[in-house]
Image (cartoon, rainbow, N blue to C red):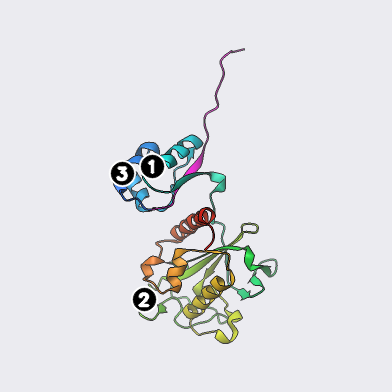
Amino acid sequence: MSGKSQTEPAVADHRVVVFGIPDDPEQLRDLIAELAEVDRVTAGQLVRNLPGVLPQILTRNAAAGLATEIRRLGLTATSIPMADAPDLSHARSTHHVRLSEQGFEVADAEDGAKSWPWSSVSLLSVGIVPSTAPPHSHPAPTLASGSSHRLWNEGIRVPARARPEALVVLNEDEHVYRIASDAMNYEYLAQRLSTSSSINFRQLVGDLVNYATDAWVTPSTHAFLDRSPMSHYEFRSRDDFRRYTEFQTLRSRKFGHR
């Protein structure tokens, strides 16, 4: 029997979250390159995508050390276990919701309609993303037709192959629903129903924000409702929009709602 003690290797199971934008990007780039063991070009790309979650998976000590050094540069940063990192990749697409004072209802659920009180809605996020609809497709007769995703609102043009979407995150059972503007049945709007899916979607988002008073509303959602420049809520891909919303989920946990 050997008298030597054996130490199990440290497990890489932590990531680092950075909650701000650096005053000196090059200094942070060099720090990440050194401590996360990536090349300077990759580190520079990571810095340009901040605030957000760094993709590198590190040991607990390495992640804590990197977060500490980032904080010394004047930024808010923390390390988190992988198990605590939000994962919204399982978002379910819904084409029929009903919103009322009683709560948020998904009417096209496979096993029947499901509903939640508004206190269960933890986060609302809106962004313009590339559309997954086939070229030249048209909404089904039950959906609102009209300008669809081609006209956003007065004075703002949206590319033909892009559309606004919303992610609704529920704190019960970690449900996440995706609502695409041009693939929705807006019948709950009743007398407010328009022939434009863009107008209907804007009303739906406004209702979500007004009803879900405890939810974290992302900056992109506020920019959308305020009719800010489209660059404030446009994303290159669905994955970018998802990662942005995952970061906003972490931000809501750290800084509280609204």
Residue that badge 1 annotates = 72
- Circle 3: residue type: Gln
- Circle 2: residue type: Arg
Q: Position of residue 176 (x, y in %)?
A: 58, 61
Badge 2 or badge 3: first in the primary sequence: 3
Q: Position of residue 31 (x, y in %)?
A: 35, 40
Residue positioned 66% across, 67% down in the render: 117
Badge 2 or badge 1: first in the primary sequence: 1
Q: Quadrant of residue 3?
A: top right
In the visual, does 38 lie left or right of 244? left
Residue that badge 2 annotates = 157
In the visual, does 181 lie left or right of 40? right
Q: Quadrant of residue 88?
A: bottom right
Q: Between 138 and 88, which is closer to the camera in this rendering?
A: 88
Marker disc for residue 27: 3
Extent of the magenta region: 1-20
Q: CA distance from mark 1 to mark 3?
A: 11 Å
- Is 143 rendered above or below residue 65? below
Residue occupying the far right of the picture: 112
Number of residues whose C-alpha sits closer than 10 Å to that of mark 2, classed few (under 14), some (14–19) or many (20 or more): few
Main secondary structure type of the part rendered in magenta: loop
Q: Position of residue 129 (x, y in %)?
A: 44, 66
Residue occupying the far bottom of the picture: 191
- Circle 1: residue type: Arg
Residue positioned 31% across, 44% down in the render: 27
